[in-house]
Image (spheres, helix red, strand yellow):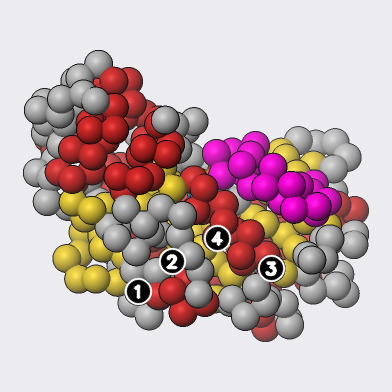
Amino acid sequence: MLMQKKILVTGASGLIGQELCKALEAQGHRVQGLARGSGPGCWDPSTGFIDTTVLEGVDTVVHLAGENVAQRWTRSAKREIRDSRVKGTKLLMDAMLDREERPDLIMASGINYYGFADPEVKDEQSPLGKGFLASVCRDWEATASPWPKAGGRLVMLRTGIVLSAKGGALAKMLPPFRLGLGGTIGNGRQRMSWISIEDIVAVYLRAVEDKALKGPVNAVAPNSVSGTVFAQELGAALNRPTWLPTPAFALRLAFGVMAKEVILSDMDIKPRALEVSGFTWRHLEIRDAFRSILQ
Ligand SMILES: NC(=O)c1ccc[n+]([C@@H]2O[C@H](COP(=O)([O-])OP(=O)(O)OC[C@H]3O[C@@H](n4cnc5c(N)ncnc54)[C@H](OP(=O)(O)O)[C@@H]3O)[C@@H](O)[C@H]2O)c1
């Protein structure tokens, strides 16, 4: 039987947070969200405010908060994407270091750590890549590095494209695909490293319970797919044709650099640490993930 824990979750209102909080509660844990605000039980990374009483008696902190990256990267959007993660993590870290307890810290990061266009297969040993998001992931993770030095357990879940009908990349693609207007994105040769919402929640649950899991952990399914297969399988799951491609130049025109680093990203990431830990995926193949998510 699992020991009941008190778990504090930042970004609990987001795509992953909502599903994760439900799953943690279903396991009998006491879950408290740390949402942005200026009152009791809140924090605000933009002003440096945190109600530190929320940390009392906490066994695990799950840190998901961060400005959404799927937007046009204006100068102010880039500042917000970086600051929300780096200043948010620093605020949390300072508050945690001020206390005697050493709860486990499970934080989100991204496979963008490894860059956005590199044909080589990557695992957790692979070096930092190039690009804006790689530098954000580096600084985000580095801000939490005092935690293991202070004796706490730190897990950084470098997450791939989370597939859910309720939000994120897939939810944005669904309207055109449902109308039969979807198709391959870019040249279709790029590798897409994905994970189903059910599996990313299971990875967080595993990270909460498994004390042997530490450091960077790639949170992706073992089988990445090409952009062409992604579009074909999505169309097949929806029973719709996929012969209308979305050319890369149109995406770059609409979304600027974000299209290059996120939508058209070409990264083949392997989840070595999860494999070594004996984690079992519910969705190993994208076909099964789409069928289950869209049923
Ligand atoms: N979904 C993916 O495909 C994916 C892939 C790779 C990495 N990740 C990472 O995993 C984490 C969770 O992902 P998600 O998809 O659940 O994110 P999400 O739906 O965008 O939610 C993130 C949460 O962060 C808080 N937040 C939003 N803007 C913020 C800001 N400017 N400053 C501080 N907090 C802010 C919000 O919570 P409150 O309003 O309650 O404060 C929001 O609900 C994120 O850090 C994301 O970068 C996700």
Disc 2 to disc 1, how far (Cα)?
7 Å
Q: Kindly identify the amino acid type of the residue bearing the numbered disc 1.
A: Asp
Reading the image, the residue beneath label 3 is 209
Indicate which disc, 4 or 1, sits on the residue closer to the N terminus.
Answer: 1
Q: Which residues are magenta?
A: 12-32
Residue 11 is situated, as x and y percent measured from the top left of the image, at 64, 44
Q: Residue furthest top?
A: 179
Q: Residue at x 49, y 45 (%)?
A: 197
Mark sitting on residue 218: 2
Disc 4 secondary structure class: helix
Q: Position of residue 198 (x, y in %)?
A: 52, 48
Which comes sooner in the sequence, label 2 or label 1? 1
Pointers 3 and 4 in contact (C-beta within 8 Å)? no
**Residues at marks 2 and 4, CA–CA distance in whole angstroms:** 10 Å
Image-quarter location of ligand 1: top right
Specify few, some or many for label 2: CA neighbours under 10 Å numbering under 14, 14-19, or 20 or more.
many
For marks 2 and 4, the one nearer the N-term is 4
- The residue at which mark 1 appears reads as 123
Question: What quarter of the picture does the C terminus occupy?
Answer: top left
How crowded pointer 3 is (Cα within 10 Å; few <14, some 14-19, many 20+) is rated as some
**Number of numbered discs on residues:** 4
Q: Which residue is mark 4?
A: 203
Tell whether label 1 touches label 2 (CB within 8 Å): yes
Q: Can you tell me whether the CB of the residue at mark 2 lies under 8 Å from the nearest atom of ligand 1?
A: no
Q: Earlier in the sequence, mark 3 or mark 2?
A: 3
Q: Is mark 4 within 8 Å of ligand 1?
A: no
Q: Quadrant of residue 242?
A: top left
